[in-house]
Image: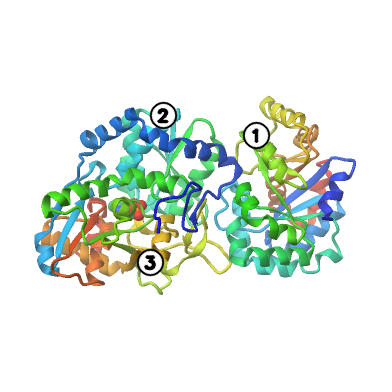
Amino acid sequence: MNYNVTEKGYYGTYGGAYIPEMLYPNVENLRQNYLKIMQEPSFKEEFDQLLKDYVGRPSPLYFAKRLSEKYNTKVYLKREDLNHTGAHKVNNTIGQILMAKKLGKNRIIAETGAGQHGVATATVCALMGMDCIVYMGEIDIARQAPNVARMKMLGAEVRPATSGSKTLKDATNEAIRDWINNPVDTHYIIGSAIGPHPYPDMVTRFQSIISEEIKWQLKEKEGRENPDYVVACIGGGSNAAGTYYHFLHEEEVGIIAVEAAGKGIHSGESAATSALGKEGIIHGCRTLLMQTEDGQITEPYSISAGLDYPGVGPLHSHLYTSGRGEFYSATDDEAMTSGLELTQLEGIIPAIESSHALAIFKHKTFKPEDVVVISLSGRGDKDLDNYIKYFNL
Amino acid sequence: MKNRIHSKMQEDKKLLSIYFTAGYPALNNTVQILEDLEKNGVDMVEIGLPFSDPLADGPTIQASSSKALKNGMTTAVLFDQLKDIRKTVSIPLILMGYFNPMMQYGVEAFCKKCQEIGIDGLIIPDLPVAVYHEEYQPIFEKYGLINVFLITPQTDDERIRYIDSVSNGFIYMVSSASVTGSQSGFGNTQQDYFKRIAAMQLKNPQIVGFGISNSETFTQATTDAKGAIIGSAFIKHLTANGVAAIGDFVQHIR
Ligand SMILES: Cc1ncc(COP(=O)(O)O)c(C=O)c1O
């Protein structure tokens, strides 16, 4: 089975570019050029340099001794939380801002839910001196005040999305509409492995630095490049895609995805897209998405703002449908407890999104000799309020 | 293939087409709006099937879509409302909507239902011409439906020729680089674009849409093109004046 994107932009039956004609010239321009640009030596050099000196890569692969003892297996954490701006998101925004420069664009737009991708985008725009407009649902603006303040301090304009459910999916709609209205000077930096082709593949390639590093880091520590399992949480699926990328075709590596079950898969308040979704089209991409019988896209729920997207990237739909990936979902409660557990066993406060990946231990038992690499996609600073409220700290 | 759109395009006049969102302002206004539009001399109608995430639409159509969904509009409800429409309305009817609700209904079942009702064509902004061409064209044709594609000021000549070759009815010419919504008038850039397309001598006539709001913009848009489509401005009129005053709006256009 092939898990890479096809020439036409599909993973199995998922993917493609279901976009209005107004977006065609920009998306087509990107499609024709992204691989060429990514292979240019000047691009690679600047990308690598920034990842090293600005983001702080390579991020450590940390053997979590006490967590390993507790679950009687060998757990490594890939420390994306130690990146500049506190999450994996910046790997993609660095790549895309350089791409935008090569394409001759000088105005950047982005969508954000929790604000992590918005901050990562505002950061690279400050770095490159580009105009930055971030669309954010009106409701998210109210519940993510610190990240809104960060974006503003970085010089970005935060525009409220007031349509529909006023959250991430609507912010994404607004960003797409902005791109339709500004077809010449603007590049849209999508924040996850979603959207029309070539976005899912481009974002995956920028994030694939995660698994590239895991390979040589694991070789140093364990004498082998391939772990037995790689585990990641999935919102749209960018940290997961980056964590899996170099293992997709290594059959001995188990691929594990953890989605957000919210208050329970069948509670009506969930974001477990693979379990609840049906094939359809969201934001230009044919993929699994949560929707009504009539094909209206529904609003997901999770305690973690970064996971409440009603769709999932097309690669992950393909991993799910083909059986290559094992899909689990963790409830709010399971994630929060797992987050606190990591904090107290290892002294690391994870983002609530990442806590979902850690909750894998509530669903699956590993063998003592298994090497399990978990993507610690972000740090928990942004979530302190939530943790404090939840645990009455 | 015999289709009302084809005969309409043969008429020796500039065509006025109106878009409205089904289920707005009230769930059951659909039939009355269609009958009144025909009575007042409108040539063709686009019936909007509301979608939760209409990403090519501006605030007016977004708001009407949300309201229509809240009112209870669904694909099945719309088909039911339209089941006897051909007893009272004879102008071409086009369903305009996003692809996801059609996929969920089943593309073939959807097309079949359209034929039973007497729908002449479809406009699906997020179904790209290449995907239609490779996957769905035989189904649409089996049920006698014309699928209408968009071109914009950014569409290059080669692609316009390709779209013209796949089209069969008319080409929906988006007036400017924008989502739907009214603007106050067309400047030189747009008029040059209208002329450039006219000079291409395409096989399909062009109908201009996006930003037509009154008799002035209608006249500008139809100097070179076969006709024009009014959407947001009509919806605003419905919002302000209700369904009783449709004649007032149409009479002021031409
Ligand atoms: C720390 C962190 N992890 C994960 C995610 C989920 O996104 P993705 O599935 O694209 O990795 C987010 C999104 O905001 C995030 O901030």
The amino acid type of the residue labelled 2 equals Lys
Q: Chain of mark 2?
A: A
Say which residue label 3 marks: A323
| Count of marks placed on residues | 3
The amino acid type of the residue labelled 3 equals Gly
| The label number, if any, that marks residue A102 in the structure image | 2
Q: Quadrant of residue A327?
A: bottom left
- Dot 1 alpha-carbon crowd within 10 angstroms: few under 14, some 14 to 19, many 20 or more: few
* Same chain, labels 2 and 1: no
Q: Quadrant of the C terminus of chain B?
A: top right
Q: Residue at image x 39%, y 30%?
A: A130
| The label number, if any, that marks residue B225 in the structure image | none
Q: Residue at image x 70%, y 26%?
A: B192
Which residue ends up furthest to the bottom in the rendered image?
Answer: A266
Q: Chain of mark 3?
A: A
Coordinates of residue A281 in the picture (x, y in percent): 53, 57
Q: CA distance from mark 2 to mark 1?
A: 25 Å
